Image (cartoon, grey):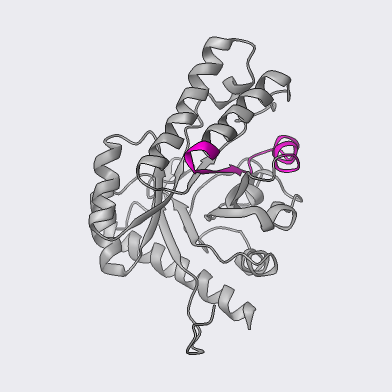
Amino acid sequence: MVEKSGRTTMQNIGIAIYSGVSFKKQAEYFKKLGVTSTFIGSETADFDGVVTTFADNGIVCESLHAPYKNINDMWSSDETVAQTMLGRLKDSVDKCAKYSIPVSVVHLSSGVPMPEINELGIARFEELFSYAEEKGVKIALENQRFLENLSFFLDRYPNVGFCWDAGHEYGFTHGINFMDMYGNRAIALHIHDNRAGINTDDHLLPFDGKIDFNEVAGKLVRNGYTGTIMLEISKEVAIDGKKVYADLTEEEYMDRAYSAVKKLAVMVEELKK
């Protein structure tokens, strides 16, 4: 990224810590570090207060993560449970509209096996897409364990965006390169590390696991992604029953998160040269 003066500037970086550090402490410490972007779940307790706390500290919520627990109900023949789930997804859109948050990130399924793509589910997601468009909010569909349902919608609905979750790609779906397939539609990122094995959704800090972040940076550059490089991490990560970051204070953990995302951003800039 180059300013009019010709000076190179780093791509914007963001950090979202979904557990292990209070939102108030995140906001205050991110301000100190100079981090200006984050995202939170749309069903976060005291949602209004959390968004306000971030805003008061100069932290912008660039997206909301729509609820994903019971997301498979969107494909159900039980209209009651399906409408309950659809209502929760619409609530995320409403909160985006209320606080001028441009993107709601949505899962299409959870776990295995993948729910069968059916007309009921298609119609419900179409209703969500239309509702978001009316509200001026973009839906970003996130890669999970399967390509089929993601491709079904992204190939048919050009107004729907893509959220690339690098951790999911390397932990769930080895050999499927989602970013090269849909990077031109990417409007959000979820960056985290893991053990790069089947079903390893660890949400480690970048460079603490086995993901090749030179490859991640290459995919971002190759596909022209210029949005925020956003971490989706947790201080509460436990592997084999042991909390990985238990020995770090909250401040030390946030310092390491900042250093990791900044390192990735620098790698991206170097590849652009």
Quarter of the figure with the N terminus: bottom right
- Image point 51% across, 89% down: which residue? 6
Q: Is residue 205 magenta?
A: no
Q: Is the C terminus in the top left, top right, bottom left or bottom right quadrant?
A: bottom right
Q: Residue 216 or 41: which is nearer the viewer?
A: 41
Residue 191 position in % (x across, y down): 53, 56
Left or right? Give the position of 40 relative to 108.
left
Task: State the extent of the magenta-drawn residues as a range.
Answer: 133-156
Residue 182 seen: yes
Magenta span includes 147: yes
Q: Is residue 249 visible?
A: no
Residue 104 lies left or right of residue 257; in this view the side is right
- Residue 236 left/right relative to 122: left
Q: Residue at x 73, y 53 (%)?
A: 177
Of all residues, the one furthest to the front in this rendering is 134
Q: Residue at x 30, y 46 (%)?
A: 51
Taking depth in this image into account, of 164 and 172 the one nearest to the observer is 164
Task: Name above or below for residue 63 compared with residue 183.
Answer: above
Q: Is residue 59 above or below residue 63?
A: below
Residue 142 position within the rendered picture, expressed as x and y whole percent measured from the top left: 60, 43
Depth check: give the residue in front, 262 or 85. 85
In front: 23, or 240? 23
Give the quadrant of residue 245.
bottom left
Can you give x and y, in whole percent of width and height, for residue 134 in the image?
Answer: 52, 37
